[in-house]
Image: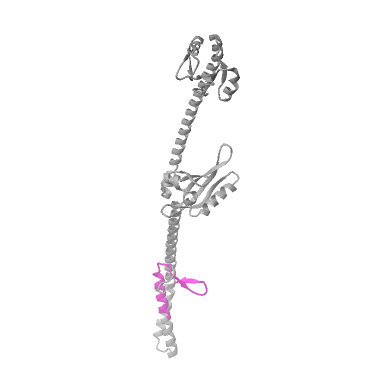
Amino acid sequence: MKPVHLLSPVPPALPALLAAAGFSAAESALLAISPWPGAPVEPAGPLTVALLASPELAGDALAAGAVAAFCLPQAPDALAALLDPLWAAAQHTDRRIRAMERENRRALAELQSTRDLLGRLIDATPNPVMAVDLRGRVLVFNRAAETALGYDAAWARAHMHVTEVYVDASEARRVLAEIRASPDGLVQGLSARLRARSGEQVPVLLSAAEVHAADGMPIGTVGVFQDRRSELALRLRLEETTGQLIESEKRAATAEVAGAAAHELNQPLTAVMGILEMLELRSDLPEDVAQRLGRATLQLERMADLVRRLAATTRSRTVGYVGQTRILDLSGEGGDS
């Protein structure tokens, strides 16, 4: 027996006639029979048949939503001929609906799996990733972004606007302008500054692109940020170390040159001082010559003192000389290094 749902009131003869035609009344069925007029057409399933009191009512019943309308025939075979195609159509429609529901559930499950996979991939990305919609509302904020900027990801997605992420709102507008000015809607290696929750400015290199829907309309932007703080700190340390090495090399070179110069000057200086001392021992020197020899000896002693300082030089201190020239400081009082 094929089940049909009866919407009362129905003619008293209908149950027996249905049974003779191979149908049985059921509380739930894919095909419903509704008397017209006498009860509204309320589909209990995909298809509802209007049972007419008069043939003239067929148009109104069909307009009200019935899929078929007829007066009750007297013979079971005639009733079966009317209901069998409709019952088969109801079964076919039900199978299609169930298949569509299964396909929709499968598609939704695949979509959810894909979303979960993408979410895990984005969270596993070592660089901060952020996506925003056309209004600038944050949609994606991964764990690396949490770590770099200090904002909770859930809070960022619920409350943050893209202009709050950058140091200045103009930077957000500049990035969007760069993206839209690019022929392929993609920028790479764009310098920008983000603002951490602590207020710290975070220098980054940004790679960003505009995201489009299936119809080609833009729906937002996504960006991957490379935190440059470690890179810049390393560069600063490298520059400091390089400066220290250069200064060390300068000191070493200064000591070598000073030592060599002192050694080379010391020998002729000693010889000249010896000659002057021998001349001063002569008793026949005129007074004015003896005085000049004394003054010359004093200057040589000054030179000897400078040579000793030159030999002891370990730092490349300099002092101003003529114009922009700077010379090695041998005074012992210090100067610019």
Residue 255 visible, this orientation: yes
Q: What is the quadrant of the C terminus in the image?
A: bottom left
Residue 273 visible, this orientation: no
Is 152 placed above or below 17 here? below
Q: Which residues are magenta?
A: 299-328
Is residue 273 a member of the stretch shown in magenta? no
Residue 250, position as x, y percentages in the image: 44, 64
317 sits to left or right of 75: left
Task: Look at 44% across and 86% down and name the residue there.
Answer: 292
Q: Nearer the viewer, residue 273 or 332?
A: 332
Is residue 304 a member of the stretch shown in magenta? yes
Task: Look at 52% across and 16% down and name the residue there.
Answer: 87
Is 259 placed above or below 191 here? below
Residue 336, position as x, y percentages in the image: 44, 69
Residue 67, position as x, y percentages in the image: 56, 21
Task: Look at 49% across and 51% down and name the residue there.
Answer: 163
Q: Nearer the viewer, residue 79 or 176?
A: 79
Q: How many marks?
A: 0
Q: Nearer the viewer, residue 304 or 146?
A: 146
Is 287 placed above or below 137 here? below
